[in-house]
Amino acid sequence: MLQLSAQTAILLATQPQDFRKGIDGFVAVCRDSLQQNPRADIRFVFINKSRTMLRVLTYDGSGYWLMTKRLSKGRFQNWPNSQNKVSPMLATELRVLLKGEANPTYKKV
């Protein structure tokens, strides 16, 4: 499981991404589209267009991790819809989202 603490920086990409991309593709999205340093101590969370899958990209100091969560049924709800390219999230909200138990309320930027 992904290690998260209250101090973990988490950014959600508000626009759906093409999940055919691999690690290098998501690193490029962080750097070029989101204007973020992909090697920073940040968990970047992405959703696919059909809202059935999430991907989390993080750098651990020696390499990248790209984790995937695919729902067996249903869709992720209440994804932030903002003019901003990223939206911050608390670790507790991400834990709830990854468990698929409820729909967290996301903070507005």
Image: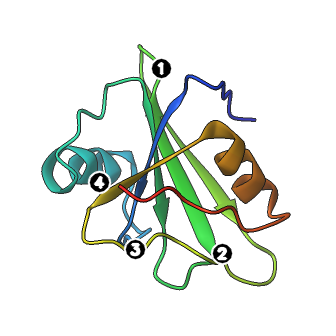
Dot 3 or dot 1: first in sequence order is 3
Dot 2 or dot 3: first in sequence order is 3
Q: Which residue is mark 1?
A: 60
Q: Residue at x 81, y 76 (%)?
A: 72
Nearer to the camera, 93 or 73: 93
Secondary structure beneath label 2: loop
> Is disc 1 surrounded by few (<14), some (14 to 19) or many (20+) residues within 10 Å?
few
Colouring style: rainbow
**Circles 4, 3 touching at the beta carbon (< 8 Å):** no
Q: CA distance from mark 4 to mark 2?
A: 22 Å
Q: Which residue is mark 3?
A: 16
Residue 69 % position (x, y): 67, 59
Q: CA distance from mark 1 to mark 2?
A: 27 Å
Residue 75 % position (x, y): 68, 81
Image disc number at residue 76:
2
Check disc 2 and give the amino acid type: Phe
Residue 3 % position (x, y): 68, 27
